[in-house]
Every structure is written in C-alpha cells, then in structure tokens.
C-alpha cells in the first residue's frame, strides 16, 4: 500500500501504529501524518492511554494442570474425528428424503383404495352386456344420454362426470348400432367399447 | 504442511522459534502425539484464558472455553492448512467458542449502539483520581459488545495486526477498522478525562 485515500484512512491505522504491527509503507505514512496533524497526535495520546490501561492487567489465578487433566478426560482414547465430506452428508440426506417420499406415496396410495382404469373390465357386468365409454359435452346429463342412445335396454352406469365421461351398459346384440348412433351425434366427442 | 503466509502471525508470539515450534507441535498433534499437545496446551493456556475472559467478560465461562478450544485443536489439527499462523488459527477457534458461550449465557447480545457513552463531565476533575478513571475505562471496555471488545483487546493487549484480527474474527479488515473506530468513540470521553485535555 503506497498511497492512502484520505487522512481519515491514516487516522484509522493509528491503533496499529501504536502496537507496532503496520507494514513499513503504512508506518511511514502514519509517521508523516503525525508530523503535521494535531488531531492525529491527540488521538495517539488517547490510544496510548487506552493501551496502558488495558495492559495493566491484574494477575489471573487459574490451575493449568487441573484443567489439563479435565481436558485429558474428555479427549478419551480416540484422536481425530473421521472427516466426512459434506457431499456424503448431502447424499445421505437425499437418500433419506427419497425413502421418506416413497413411503409416504405408498401409504397415501393404500389409503385411497383400489381404482378402475379405463381398460379394466367391471366384474359385475354380465357377459351379454357390452360396456361403452363416452365423452359428452357439458349440457348432456345421464337422462339425456340415455335418450340419445335411443334404446330402452341401454343404461347409464356411471357419469357423466365433471369431465363429461360416462359409461353405458349396452346389450351386446345392440352394441354396434348404439355406438354408431352415438358416434353420429355431435354432442358426443368420443364413443368406444371398453376392452374386455 | 508448510506455513504459506509468514506475515500472519500473532505478535504475542515472542519469537520466530516459537512460531516454528507451534507448527511442529501441531503436525505432531495431527499424528496423535499427546505430549506435543500438552506442550501446545500449556503454551497457549494463559493467552487463551486472558483472551476468552476479555471477550466473554465471564470468569466462570473461561476454563470451559479454553478446553473446548483446545479439544477442537486436538481433533482437527489435521485440517489446519497453514493459511494463517497456528496462533491465529487457535485464537480464531477461541473467539468463536467464546461467542457461543456468551450467547448461551446471554442470548440477547447488545450492539454498539446500545452502549451509552461514558460521561464524567458532571464531576470535577480533581474529584476523580487516575485509578478511578482507569477502572472506569476497563469497565467501559468490558461493556462494549464482544465483537468490538475483541478488536480492542487483540490490538492493545495481544498486539495483533489488523490483518491478524480480521483472520481471528473471520471478518474483512474494513470491519476491524470500523469496530475499532466505534469502540474508540464510545471510550473517548473517559480518555479525554484521563489525559486532562
């Protein structure tokens, strides 16, 4: 450090000028300041007084040997703590979090109970009945859907849901005609037999 | 291990021989040498005791702080990387242990703004003798927040450079200078009185 931004910066170095720990260039700059600056000299006198007060310390009474024995008892037989890199900690934490997530997901699924997929056959449906899944517009309710099927033997088993999905039970003998009729209606976006 | 920054040395170390011996001791401690550790313990005990006492201001905390500090030295000597002198490394550990002990003792630590400036102007100068003012100065230093007190004590009692202090306290050198500035501002009325200015 060869230059100093301001006298204030040099004033800040005065405590360490007093204890003799400044580098040579800093020391020279502070010495030059003290040759011309009354305020710096006043601060230096204060710092000397502070140093003299603090170094005039009462004698401490403490038993080194006793405390060494206490420490020895705590040191035990082992020496170094095995150093475990932080990445190992993070990997262990991630593994535990993953395991906890898996367990939580498993038990959450168990609580929800069994559910039907689009392809799962309903075991309660007789063999001579075909299940037909349809997707209808919002204005079509179950009664309207039954009317659209135009077959007294067609029943709406489920739906329409909030998303417009409904399942119809259709006599297998009429299934193709009913599917064809419903597919022709613009209020139905999707009509298909449920795979058995 | 080789010391890379020779200038980072506590001025409390009386000579280079002791600094080199500190380093040799720490290498032996890293290898589990209890004899070397005892030498290091006895060499540092009083300095750490005084330092911790000045940072915490609580005599009943100090022995535990010193032993906690040296236990860390014993267990982590192998992690010392010589980016600072051994003494600076040990004092840094002692500083953190002191602050922790102080926080357990007194969770709500005061800031420098909470410390009132000492005023003696209400008394005649003749009524207060020098010893009383010195005692008042020591009490005023003891009343500073631990971070500011550490800067003042490391400077004037342990003769540390501001770079050493920054390493021990784990803060920038600018912070060391500003803490010294504010501490001096708080102590100024007493010092003015002491000097009779």
Image (cartoon, grey):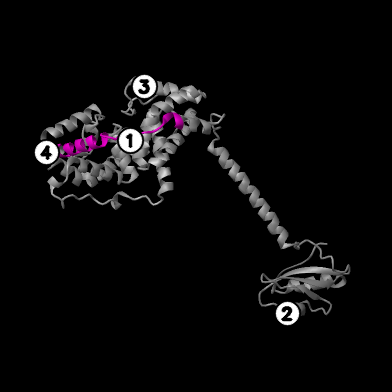
For numbered disc 2, what is the local secondary structure? helix
Element carrying mark 4: helix
User: Which residue occupies 31% across, 35% down?
Assistant: B154
Query: Which mark is nearer the camera, 1 or 2?
Result: 1
As measured in the structure, the alpha-carbon distance from the residue carrying label 3 to the one carrying label 1 is 20 Å
On screen, residue B52 versus residue A100, left or right, reads left
Chain for mark 2? A
Q: Residues within 10 Å of mark 4 (few under 14, many from 20)?
A: few
Image position of B101 with respect to B75: above or below: below
Magenta range is A41-67
Q: Which mark is residue B18?
A: 3
**Most common SS among magenta residues:** helix
Q: Is A62 within the magenta?
A: yes
In this rendering, do the residues under marks 4 and 1 share a single chain? Answer: no
Q: Chain of mark 1?
A: B
Q: Secondary structure at mark 1?
A: helix
In this view, B153 is above or below A193: above
Q: Which residue is mark 1?
A: B165
Q: CA distance from mark 4 to mark 2?
A: 102 Å
Numbered tag placed on residue A160 in the rendering: none
Give how far across and how far down residue B118 sits, in percent.
22, 49
| Mark carried by residue A38 | 4
Task: Name the residue that disc number 2 marks.
Answer: A144
Tell which tag, 4 or 3, sits nearer the viewer.
3
Q: Quarter of the image for the N terminus of chain B: give it.
A: top left
Q: Residue at x 14, y 47 (%)?
A: B127
Q: CA distance from mark 4 to mark 1?
A: 28 Å
Give the distance between the C-alpha atoms of the residues marked 4 and 3, in whole angstroms: 40 Å
CA–CA distance between discs 2 and 3?
A: 99 Å
């Amino acid at each position: 450090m060869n230059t100093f931004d301001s006298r204030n910066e040099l004033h800040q170095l005065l405590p360490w000028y007093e204890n003799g720990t400044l580098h040579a260039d800093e020391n020279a700059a502070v010495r030059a300041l003290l040759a011309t600056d009354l305020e710096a000299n006043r601060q230096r006198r204060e710092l000397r007084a502070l140093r003299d007060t603090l170094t005039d310390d009462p004698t401490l009474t403490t038993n080194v040997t006793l405390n060494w024995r206490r420490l020895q008892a705590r040191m035990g037989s082992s020496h170094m703590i095995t150093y475990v890199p932080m990445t190992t900690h993070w990997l262990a934490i991630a593994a535990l979090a993953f395991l906890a997530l898996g367990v939580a997901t498993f038990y959450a699924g168990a609580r929800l109970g069994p559910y039907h997929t689009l392809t799962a056959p309903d075991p309660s449906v007789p063999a001579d009945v075909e299940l037909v899944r349809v997707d209808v517009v919002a204005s079509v309710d179950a009664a309207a859907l039954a009317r659209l099927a135009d077959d007294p033997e067609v029943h709406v088993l489920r739906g329409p849901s909030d998303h417009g999905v409904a399942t119809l039970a259709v006599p297998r003998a009429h299934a193709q005609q009913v599917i064809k009729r419903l597919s022709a209606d613009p209020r139905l976006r999707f009509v298909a037999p449920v795979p058995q | 291990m080789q010391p890379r920054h020779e200038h980072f040395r506590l001025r409390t170390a009386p000579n280079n021989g002791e600094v080199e011996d500190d380093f040799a001791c720490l290498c032996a401690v890293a290898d589990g040498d209890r004899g070397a550790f005892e030498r290091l313990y006895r060499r540092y005990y009083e300095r750490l005791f005084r330092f911790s006492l000045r940072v915490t201001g609580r005599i009943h905390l100090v022995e535990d702080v010193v032993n906690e500090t040296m236990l860390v030295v014993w267990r982590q000597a192998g992690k010392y990387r010589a980016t600072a002198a051994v003494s600076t490394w040990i004092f840094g550990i002692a500083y953190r242990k002191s602050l922790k002990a102080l926080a357990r003792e007194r969770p709500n630590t005061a800031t420098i703004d909470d410390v009132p400036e000492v005023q003696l102007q209400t008394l005649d100068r003749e009524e207060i003798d020098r010893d009383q003012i010195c005692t008042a100065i020591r009490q005023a230093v003891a009343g500073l927040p631990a971070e500011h007190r550490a800067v003042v004590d490391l400077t004037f009692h342990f003769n540390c450079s501001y770079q050493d202090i920054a390493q021990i306290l784990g803060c920038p050198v600018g912070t060391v200078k500003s803490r010294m500035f504010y501490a001096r501002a708080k102590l100024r009325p007493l010092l003015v009185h002491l000097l009779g200015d």
